[in-house]
Image (cartoon, rainbow, N blue to C red):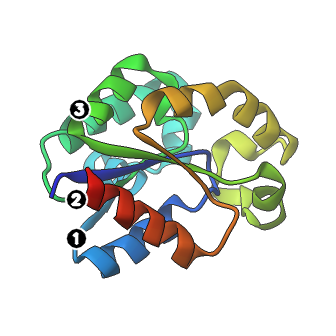
Amino acid sequence: MKNIILVGIMGCGKTTISKLLSEKLKMPVIDMDKYIEKKYQCTIPDMFAISEEYFRDRESEACLDMAKLDGYIISTGGGVIKRKKNRDVLKQAGTVFYIDRPVDNIVTDVETAHRPLLKDGPEKLYQLFDERHQLYLDSCHYHVKNDGTLTDIVNKIVEDVQED
């Protein structure tokens, strides 16, 4: 089975959904942010402290690494779609699902302490959504609304993958 790639704004459920998909489909999961931190021996907040560009360069390299995988569930970082080359690489690397969760729901339960782009408050999330929504749509094969149960979302993704 080819890769299943999850994109969406931070807090949309990519990590949780990837774990549930892994259990259901018996596929390994790779979290792109954790992969980047391990590969470069540096936390994402520390990379952002150098510059966002520095982090985005590492992220683009990780996309190329992920493109070499086969049969993985890949949970990406929220901003991976900011660069067109990343969107193109991911679309070629597998089936891309945009997990679209209402921002109002995210704001109520996302932990901002470990999210460098949210250090100035949750209103930034609304701005990021406005900036990125179309990019997420442009980068995906399937647009999945995350406004139901996790079971419903996982079943919908499995159904779409099996039709592919």
Kindly identify which residue carries mark 3. 92
Q: Determine crowd level at label 3: few under 14, some 14-19, many 20+ residues with C-alpha closer than 10 A.
A: few
* Mark positioned earlier in the residue sequence (3 or 1): 1
Give the number of the disc on residue 27. 1
Q: Amino acid at mark 2?
A: Tyr
Residue 51 visible to the viewer: no
What residue appears at the point 28 percent right and 39 percent down from the top-left corner? 62
Lower sequence index among marks 2 and 1: 1
Quadrant housing the N terminus: bottom left
| Location of residue 44 in the rendering, given as x and y in whole percent from the top left corner | 49, 46
Amino acid marked by disc 1: Met
Q: Name the secondary structure under disc 3.
A: helix
Q: Quadrant of residue 88?
A: top left
Q: Is residue 27 above or below residue 137?
A: below
Residue at the location (62% across, 50% down)? 10
Residues at marks 3 and 1, CA–CA distance in whole angstroms = 19 Å
Q: Amino acid at mark 3?
A: Gln
As drawn, is 119 to the left or to the right of 53?
A: right
User: Which of 127/138 is in front?
Assistant: 138
**Which residue lies most toward the front here?**
163
Q: Which residue is mark 2?
A: 72
